[in-house]
Amino acid sequence: MAMVTALVSERPVVIFSKSSCCMCYTIKTLISSFGANPTVYELDEHPEGKQIEKELRGLGCKPSIPVVFIGEGLIGGANEIMSLHLKGQLVPLLLKANAIWV
């Protein structure tokens, strides 16, 4: 878990993704559409991608991508992000993490 913890501590929004995943693309686009600039780790292109994916599964992330951290907190995958968005809770979460400004 040390590698994931170190990577998410550096930025307000971190997305673990795969470059060929359509749901990953959708989540990255949604979060960026609010003005956030997420740090994206493409696990299929990252030298430690398999180890990171193993750690994400260890955190209970199934499927292991996409996985979104906001403000160093594990939010979850596409279902959780879309649910927050539909409830109007995603933007306040991004604001609280200083990922976007009004």
Image (cartoon, rainbow, N blue to C red):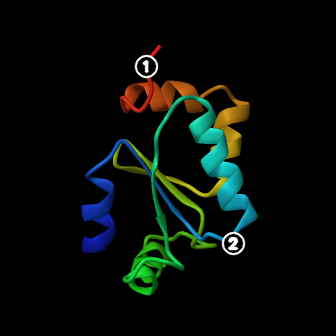
Q: Name the residue: 47% across, 78% down.
A: 53
Q: Is residue 20 above or below residue 98?
A: below
Q: Of all residues shown, which one is farthest toward the top?
A: 102
Q: Name the residue: 25% across, 72% down.
A: 2
Q: Nearer the viewer, mark 2 or mark 1?
A: 2
Determine which quarter of the picture holds residue 56: bottom left
Where is residue 43 drawn, in percent x and y?
A: 50, 75
Where is residue 77 drawn, in percent x and y?
A: 61, 58
Where is residue 20 drawn, in percent x and y?
A: 69, 72
Determine which quarter of the picture holds residue 98: top left
Q: Mark 2 or 1 closer to N-term?
A: 2
Q: Name the residue: 66% across, 25% down.
A: 88
Residue type at mark 2 is Ser
Q: Which residue is mark 2?
A: 20
Residue type at mark 1 is Trp
Residue 91, numbered circle? none
Where is residue 97 drawn, in percent x and y?
A: 37, 33
22 or 59, nearer to the observer: 22
Number of other residues with Cα within 10 Å of mark 2, as a class: few under 14, some 14 to 19, many 20 or more: few
Could you tell me which secondary element the residue under label 1 belongs to?
A: loop
In the rendered structure, the answer to whether residue 93 lies left or right of residue 73 reads right
Q: CA distance from mark 2 to mark 1?
A: 30 Å
Q: Quadrant of the N terminus?
A: bottom left
Q: Would you say the residues marked 2 and 1 are in contact, meaning their CB atoms lie under 8 Å apart?
A: no
Q: Is residue 16 above or below residue 89?
A: below
Q: Is residue 58 above or below residue 82?
A: below
Q: Which residue is mark 1?
A: 101
Could you tell me which secondary element the residue under label 2 belongs to?
A: loop
